[in-house]
Amino acid sequence: MVHISRFDLNLLVVFDAIYREGSATKAAAKLNLTQPAISHALGRLRALLDDPLFERTGRSFAPTAGARSLIDPVRQALRTLDVALTQLGQFEPGKAERRFVIGTRDVLESTVLPALMQRIGASAPYVDVASVRADRKSLESGLASGLIDVAMDMLLPLSEEIRRRRVEMDRLVVVARRGHSAFVDNLDLSTYLRLDHILVSSRRHGGGLEDLELARLGPLCRRRLCPC
């Protein structure tokens, strides 16, 4: 068994050329190599695979049974590499056959994904999308490693290595009893921070979205919370 780490992929190009041309001389001309270079590559390939691969019949090379069983997988692999290298940096939605993983929250799945999937279905019919729950603690590592292609979440304190763009903005409002003294005039930040608050959140502990935004304003912007 030959491990891929020991394998020179250029040998497969030589193998394909000899198989196609039926001659080491013609393969050398096709690849713009010398005949000794082709012979040396074939010798290495024979040693690695422990198979003669080709047998001389007059002036031509006839493939062995091992070569005939190998040629289709080799050509498929070479075509895949050729397409990947040719399309490097290019993306044509209408032809792309890819699977994208989106890390998001359940509340966004119902509001964002229906319209997104409708557009993808129209412009990129061969693209698949998987929506997964993104843990905010490992979000950056997931994006950096490629486990997640894109994430949809609130503005998080991530490093500059993570590119981001605002796609939507929610409006937050303060609810109070009718006739509350704080609402005689416009509610300013200092009055807001001075009051007691009830925090309604699905999280078991920690602050909410408002706390993250207030934290951006500085350490003095803290509220007295009654979690519920």
Image: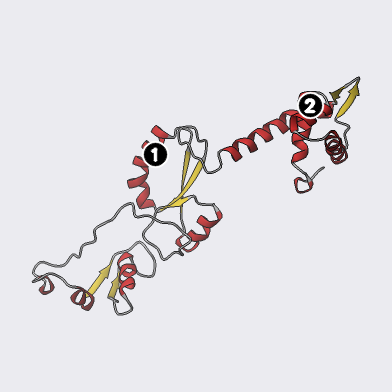
Q: Secondary structure at mark 1?
A: helix
Residue 60 in the image: x percent, y percent? Answer: 86, 22
Q: Looking at the picture, does residue 214 appear above or below residue 84?
A: below
Q: Which numbered marker is on residue 19?
A: 2
The residue under the point 54% across, 52% down is 146
Three-letter amino acid code at the position of disc 1: Met
Q: In this rendering, would 158 be left or right of 63?
A: left
Residue 134 visible in image: yes
- Relative side of 206 to 29, left or right: left
Which image quarter is the N terminus in? top right
Front position in the image: 97 or 28 = 28
* Image quadrant in which the C terminus is located: bottom left
Quarter of the figure with residue 11: top right
- Image vertical order of residue 203 relative to residue 71, above or below: below
| Residue 125, position as x, y percentages in the image | 45, 32
Q: Residue at x 29, y 74 (%)?
A: 225
Q: Nearer the viewer, mark 1 or mark 2?
A: 2
Which one is in front, 11 or 123? Answer: 11
Task: Decide: few, some or many residues near mark 1? Use Cα within 10 Å; few <14, some 14-19, many ≥20.
Answer: some
Name the mark on residue 146.
none
- The alpha-carbon separation of the residues under discs 1 and 2 comes to 46 Å
Mark 2 residue type? Tyr
Note whether 27 is above or below 218 in the view shown: above
Residue lying at the far top of the rendered structure: 58
Residue 187 percent location from the top left of the image: 15, 71
* Residue 70, visible in the rendered structure: no
Q: Which residue is mark 1?
A: 117
Q: Helix, strand, or loop for circle 2?
A: helix
Q: Position of residue 224 (x, y in %)?
A: 27, 77
129 or 89, which is in the foreground?
89
Q: Earlier in the sequence, mark 1 or mark 2?
A: 2
Is 95 on the left-hand or right-hand side of 168? Answer: right
